[in-house]
Amino acid sequence: MSKKLIAFYSRADENYVNGMIKTLEIGNTEVAAGIIKELTGADLFKIEQAKSYSSDYNECIAQAQDDQRQNSRPELTNYPETLDEYDVIYLGYPNYWSTMPMAVFTFLEHFNFSDKTIKPFCTHEGSGLGSSVSDIKKLCPKAKIEKGLAIRGGSVNRAKNDIEKWI
Ligand SMILES: Cc1cc2nc3c(=O)[nH]c(=O)nc-3n(C[C@H](O)[C@H](O)[C@H](O)COP(=O)(O)O)c2cc1C
């Protein structure tokens, strides 16, 4: 048990970047996950909802806010079969309303993270990690949660040095 996994949620399409609506070919968190893979050689797993949010930014905002208000657990398309072989999990997500998308809550509740190290990283437009790290602690009380990394979404392509230091 000495492998590392990067599990991340990310949404391409319309997003709010540096004060403007922009269409992203690859989501910001996915870009950060790719940099971590390049630096660590860790396995990659994308957390995907069975019913994805709209590609339209404003609709997505409303859908994600509804899910958060209802404390819902969106169904996922699939899961890694097991996490047994991993000791470190880099957990990536965009900041949605000051915490993680609810699909990441679904993912965390699916596994037992006892004795695993979770390294949270998030991309955002100003709110940093918000309350995500304390939410991860509640969902995974037996995991060791290391210091999180917050990356401004619009600067993710220039974040390699910060990511390397954090790793
Ligand atoms: C539904 C939704 C809610 C968001 N809420 C916040 C927020 O509360 N604070 C913040 O700084 N950024 C917020 N953002 C911006 C995203 O965190 C940011 O654009 C992130 O880099 C997107 O990552 P992705 O491209 O990997 O999905 C929100 C974006 C969306 C779509």
Image: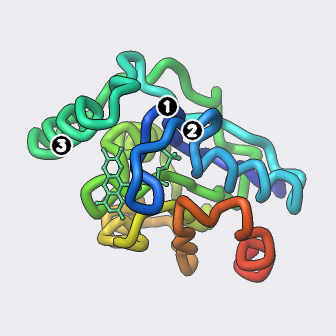
Tell me which numbered mark, 2 or 3, is placed earlier along the sequence. 2
In this rendering, position of residue 33 left or right of residue 143: right
| Mark 2 or mark 3, whichever is nearer to me | 2
**Residue labelled 2 has its Cβ within 8 Å of some atom of ligand 1:** yes
* Residue that lies at the very extreme toward the left in this rendered image: 70
Q: Amino acid at mark 1?
A: Asp
Residue at figure coordinates x 60%, y 67% from the top left: 119
Q: Nearer the viewer, mark 1 or mark 3?
A: 1
Residue 65's disc number:
3
Q: How is the image coloured?
A: rainbow
- CA distance for labels 2 and 3: 21 Å
Position of residue 70 in the picture relative to residue 161 (left or right): left
Residue at figure coordinates x 40%, y 25% from the top left = 55
- The quarter of the displayed image where residue 106 is located: top left
Residue 13: which disc? 1
Q: Distance of mark 2 from mark 1, alpha carbons?
A: 5 Å
Q: Are marks 2 and 1 in contact (CB under 8 Å)?
A: yes
- Callout 3: CB less than 8 Å from ligand 1: yes
Horizontal and vertical percent position of residue 93: 49, 52
> What's the residue type where badge 2 is placed?
Leu
Residue at x-position 10% and y-position 45%: 69
Q: Secondary structure at mark 2?
A: strand
- Left or right of residue 84, residue 55 in this image: left
Q: In this rendering, does residue 144 appear at all?
A: no
In terms of depth relative to the viewer, which is nearer, 74 or 28? Answer: 28
The residue depicted at 71 percent of the width and 70 percent of the height is 159
Q: Label 2: which residue?
A: 24
Type of residue at label 3? Gln
- Counting other residues with Cα less than 10 Å from the Cα at mark 2, is it few (<14), some (14-19), or many (20 or more)? some
